[in-house]
């Protein structure tokens, strides 16, 4: 019974969110607000669970550790001075710690992970792969296109007026357009994949619960009737001038 | 207003309606369009197939419930391949809704009944690791203290047999991640692949593919499943058809609709321009 109720609730919220495709409406507003509230509540609960696990598993072992944990909690609580005009500056301390540790952590390997390795990957790319003409063609394209795009963003000096640079600029523009096209195509794939996954749920396609199909038909009918009905009512009822 | 002009100012809700029709009809009445196996899905399958038995594999959920329609079928198929082998599987999540998705995976796959896998011996779920990249760095340095308790039973991580020899990133032989964005692959590469040399393979939503593909070329990423279509191919290779395979017809039809709309829109634009329209 609880599972059936959950299925109907899930179908209602899915369809209520999709009613935005018709227009902004109260069903959508309700679903959006409840989703946001639930997601935030879920996040807070997980944060608290993590704190509890850290306390019981690591930090409650010695007096020094307990003090350090309490200090970290106090620094964390300084976030809430974000909402005080008088003590706003205190919020900058935890912010500084978060930003500092974040940048420091990523910077320690970024030069190897995302800079040198990419240069090495480009430099060692085989231009001819025996028995695989498509890969060879792809690799030649990469070898030409990557330097062209890098040079496209080279703004120093007056070399941009040279004939060779104009050819490079053109290749770079075509390369970037191809990249944007690829990104757009994959975006369409993702958007439709999300929609297809949700549709599979609404239609009760296994392993989704089969009860969803009945809920889909019933709730869709109710939502559509209320949306269209309200529109027709509004059109037929003249507005009273104020 | 001519037909050409009408086509350019058509109410977008008719296009949404067409979208619903082009998706729901093939789901209700499958067309049985063939699925050709591509190189990405084959490489992903072969990579996992070549991992020796007894290896420690860390599966990381870098997505929440909103990406389930695209990544859930791949997640199910991957666990099917993993649990059919003799791997030690450690499950974490850098997104806080990851454990929620894993709950649904467990409900569907039932590792003890279906694959005979014992919790705490063959696999363990450590749950959410907060703070993104910093959390990943801490996890790599010391798994026991970053996740002092497991997610399912809430017992000390160090008390489980599977975790006796798994303390740092150096004890993990492979990361398998499912991703929708940040934190994700660049962070794992910076905090695990580069300092510890831990190899990685991943599945991601389509939008991310142009961003992560360069990591394949450099070898930092061993294999990649890009989006739902490749997931369907992977299910075919595994002979374990699931939701991705069931959705292939709808993917094809929906993309056909987009292609038709792009052609019609452009044709109408250029034809009306040729006739002196704006």
Image: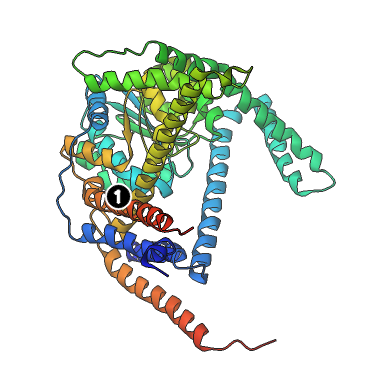
What is the x, y in percent for residue A177?
43, 35
Q: Is residue A79 left or right of residue B146?
A: right
Is residue B186 positioned above or below B109 on the image? above
What is the x, y in percent for residue A43?
54, 47
Image quadrant where residue A134 sits: top left
What is the x, y in percent for residue B243?
25, 48
Which residue lies at the image location 23% right of the left edge and 55% below the top edge? A206
Quadrant location of the N terminus of chain A in the rendered image: bottom left
Read off the residue under disc 1.
Answer: B255
Q: Chain of mark 1?
A: B
Q: Residues within 10 Å of mark 1 (few under 14, many from 20)?
A: some
The answer to which of B268 and B257 lies nearer the viewer is B268
Image quadrant where residue B29 sits: bottom left
What is the x, y in percent for residue A62?
63, 25
Is residue A124 positioned above or below B224 on the image? above
Count the marks: how many? 1
Q: Is residue B63 left or right of residue B82?
A: right
The answer to which of A238 and B123 lies nearer the viewer is A238
Colour treatment of the image: rainbow
Find numbered disc 1 in the image and state the secondary structure of the residue it sits on.
Answer: helix
Residue A120 visible within the image: yes
Quadrant location of the C terminus of chain A in the rendered image: bottom right
Residue A209 visible within the image: no
Which residue lies at the image location 50% right of the left edge and 58% below the top edge? A35
Q: Residue furthest right?
A: A86
Image quadrant where residue A175 sits: top left
The answer to which of B260 and B74 lies nearer the viewer is B260
């Amino acid at each position: 019974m609880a599972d059936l109720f959950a299925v109907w609730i899930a179908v209602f919220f899915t369809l209520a969110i999709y009613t935005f495709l018709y227009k902004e409406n109260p069903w959508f507003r309700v679903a959006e607000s409840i989703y946001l509230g639930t997601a935030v509540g879920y996040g807070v609960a997980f944060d608290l669970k993590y704190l509890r696990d850290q306390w019981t598993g690591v930090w409650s072992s010695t007096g020094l550790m307990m003090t350090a944990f309490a200090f970290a909690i106090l620094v964390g609580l300084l976030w809430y001075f974000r909402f005080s005009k008088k003590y706003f500056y205190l919020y900058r301390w935890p912010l500084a710690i978060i930003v500092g540790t974040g940048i420091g952590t990523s910077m320690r390997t970024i030069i190897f992970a995302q800079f040198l390795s990419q240069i090495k990957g480009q430099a060692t790319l085989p231009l001819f792969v025996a028995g695989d003409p498509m890969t060879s063609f792809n690799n030649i394209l990469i070898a030409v296109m990557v330097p062209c795009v890098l040079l496209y963003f080279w703004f120093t000096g007056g070399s941009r007026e040279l004939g060779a640079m104009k050819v490079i600029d053109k290749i770079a523009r075509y390369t970037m357009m191809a990249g944007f096209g690829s990104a757009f195509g994959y975006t369409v794939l993702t958007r439709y994949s999300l929609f297809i996954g949700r549709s599979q749920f609404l239609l009760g396609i296994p392993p989704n619960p089969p009860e969803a199909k009945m809920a889909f038909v019933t709730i869709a009918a109710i939502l559509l009737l209320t949306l269209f009905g309200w529109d027709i009512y509004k059109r037929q009822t003249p507005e009273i001038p104020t | 207003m001519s037909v050409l002009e009408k086509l350019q100012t058509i109410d977008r809700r008719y296009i949404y309606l067409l979208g619903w029709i082009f998706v729901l009809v093939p789901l209700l009445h499958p067309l049985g369009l063939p699925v050709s196996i591509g190189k990405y899905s084959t490489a992903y399958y072969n990579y996992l197939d070549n991992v020796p038995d007894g290896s420690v594999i860390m599966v990381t959920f870098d997505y929440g419930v909103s990406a389930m329609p695209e990544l859930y079928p791949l997640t199910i198929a991957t666990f099917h391949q993993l649990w059919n082998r003799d791997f030690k599987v450690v499950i974490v999540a850098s997104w806080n809704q990851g454990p929620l998705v894993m709950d649904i995976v467990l409900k569907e796959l039932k590792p003890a009944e279906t694959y005979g896998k014992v919790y705490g011996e063959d696999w363990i779920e450590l749950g959410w690791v907060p703070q993104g990249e910093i959390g990943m760095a801490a996890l790599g340095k010391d798994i026991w203290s970053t996740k002092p308790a497991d997610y399912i039973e809430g017992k000390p991580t160090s008390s489980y047999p599977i975790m006796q020899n798994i303390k740092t990133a150096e004890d993990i032989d492979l990361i398998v991640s499912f991703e929708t964005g940040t934190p994700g692959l660049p962070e794992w590469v910076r905090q695990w692949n580069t300092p510890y040399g831990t190899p990685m393979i991943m599945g991601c939503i389509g939008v991310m593919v142009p961003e992560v593909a360069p990591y394949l070329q450099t070898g930092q990423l061993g294999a990649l499943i890009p989006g739902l279509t490749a997931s369907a191919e992977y299910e075919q290779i595994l002979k374990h058809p699931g939701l991705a395979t069931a959705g292939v017809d709808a993917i094809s039809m929906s993309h056909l609709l987009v292609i038709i709309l792009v052609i019609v829109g452009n044709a109408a634009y250029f034809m009306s321009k040729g006739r002196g329209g704006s």
